[in-house]
Amino acid sequence: MTQKANYIGGAWVEGPDAIENLNPADPADVIGLYASADQAQMRQAVQAARDAAPAWERSSTQLRSDILFRAANEILARKEELGALVSREAGKTLADGVGEVMRAGQVFQFFAGEAVRYGGENLPSVRPDIGVQISRHPVGVVSMITPWNFPIAIPAWKIAPALAFGNTVVLKPSEHTPGAAWELFAILERAGLPAGVANLVNGYGAAAGQTLLDGADAVSFTGSVATGRKIAAGASERMMRVQLEMGGKNPLVVLDDADLDVAVECALNGAFYSAGQRCTASSRLIVADGIHDRFVQALTDRMRKLVVGDPRTAGTQIGPVINAAQLEKILGYIELGRSEGATLAEGGKRAEAATAGHFLRPTLFTESSNAMRINQEEIFGPVAAVIRVSGYDEALQVANDTAFGLSSGICTTSLKHANHFRLNVRSGLTMVNLPTAGLDYHVPFGGVKASSFGPREQGRYAVDFYTSTKTAYIGY
Ligand code: NAD
């Protein structure tokens, strides 16, 4: 099997080592061999981005916009094929894979527009005969480190704004899903991106360490809190700009006056779709006493009918988790939940399947308390726990009693409670009568507390990370 190379300075360069990209639904299915960069190659990639930076910074916004539009067009035209690859390497359903690819294409379209729209501001000075002009300038070289659960959308929503606003880029995707990002770079090359403006280095995280931070001006990271902490420490040593998007322990509150069908649908989708491997997954279901028993009954009925299996098989609703280590980690949390005294109401075991994939039945704990570790630590699998509360006030207090603050949701027909929750829950995203996951591409994304650090991603607000402002005073 030939190696799919790294892309450095406009050339496809073989790595000193290779990564086997395996299908988590069927580990015997080898998707491809991908170059694994060593630190020397990562340094070359940063240098290539540095060399390309001055010309790209001066390039016309029309050129940048045209390139981003061409990339968007190819991504969207190939959505079925690329969606199948995303499904095969990340284990999500085909519909989810295609949806993710569409989102990547839409992000490129959006920033193709932003490239020509964003601008500065003119303000009067407080002094006479002086004007103040605030202009935006690229930050320079941006290193990007991304996780496996959105292997094309997350690279897209970092790369597209970076390029639109005149930065050059080095991306290191997750070693578990190198395929989709590789396709994205082949697309960028065909779209006419000049050599060195975007560089791809596949490789292992620990080996990458801080190498990609050396010589860069900014780093944008999405992944776990543990890795985020290391990146933040390295960035602060180097006094460089940093953006971190990390985990969640997202609450879904269900009040007595909720529409039961809506609440169950929100929980089912938010907690278990994509095998719970979304940073916005609803892992804590905070349910008021008056609806608790009906909610648990209806949810477990629906959970039993969920079809877990190989995404290549029609009708599959939930695919595998990403790898054997993650499956073991989740099973460990299920054991922990039992030993902490929660009741295992549904699931809790591997799902039967024809292939040796990493399949787990959607799992629900009831009678859990918020202080339990299963309710405080991100499990990142199809596992949720119900926390019974007396009513809205306790629900809000429990929702906020977490180190995380990415997404949150409330199911209620009370406008008063919905609005109070929206204003008082401590999270960057909040949903009313909708699952905590499932987002638009054109509005800001990010959280508070341990979930996020730095300016928001996506939408118009992305400009704040990928540019610096310069304030000029002009005397007339
Ligand atoms: P991870 O932290 O293990 O890996 C993320 C990336 O960091 C990978 O590319 C990995 O190779 C790299 N990495 C690992 N160790 C490193 C090190 N020491 N130095 C430099 N890079 C290193 O996370 P993961 O398991 O790939 O992804 C799952 C996590 O991502 C979950 O916590 C999830 O909540 C989070 N996530 C967050 C968002 C968000 O936008 N908030 C979106 C998706 C996923």
Image (spheres, rainbow, N blue to C red):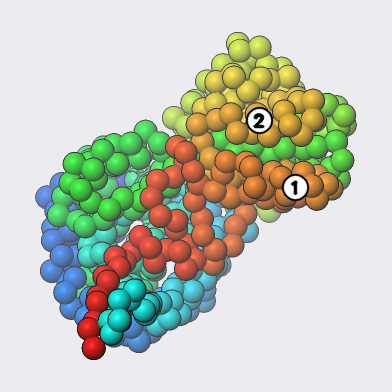
User: How many numbered tags mark residues here?
Assistant: 2
Which quadrant of the figure has residue 66? bottom left
Q: Is residue 334 left or right of residue 474?
A: right
What residue sits 60% from the left and 38% below the top?
250
Q: Residue at x 68, y 16 (%)?
A: 342
The residue labelled by disc 2 is 397
* Disc 1 to disc 2, C-alpha distance: 15 Å
Q: Is residue 393 left or right of residue 309?
A: right
Asked if residue 87 can be seen in this view, the reply is yes
Query: Residue 214, image x and y in percent?
Result: 16, 50
Helix, strand or loop under label 1? helix
Query: Is 209 in front, or is 434?
Result: 434
For image coordinates 49% across by 25% down, the residue present is 328
| Relative depth, front residue between 112 and 273 | 112
Which image quadrant: the C terminus?
bottom left
Assign ligand 1 to one image quadrant: top left
Across and down, in percent, residue 313 comes to 64, 50
Q: Amino acid at mark 2?
A: Gln
| Location of residue 407 (image quadrant) | top right
User: Where residue 184 sits in the image (x, y, percent)?
Assistant: 38, 66
Judging by the rendered image, the residue that carries numbered circle 1 is 418
Tell me if 168 is positioned left or right of 290 in this view.
left
Earlier-in-chain disc, 1 versus 2: 2
Determine if the C-beta at disc 1 is less than 8 A from ligand 1.
Answer: no
SS at mark 2 in the image: helix
Q: Which mark is residue 213?
A: none
Please name the amino acid that badge 1 sits on. Ala
Q: Badge 1: few (under 14), some or many (20 or more) residues near its Cα, within 10 Å?
A: some
Position of the N terminus, as image quadrant, is bottom left
Up the image or down, 139 lies above or below 370; here it is below
Q: Position of residue 71 (x, y in %)?
A: 41, 76
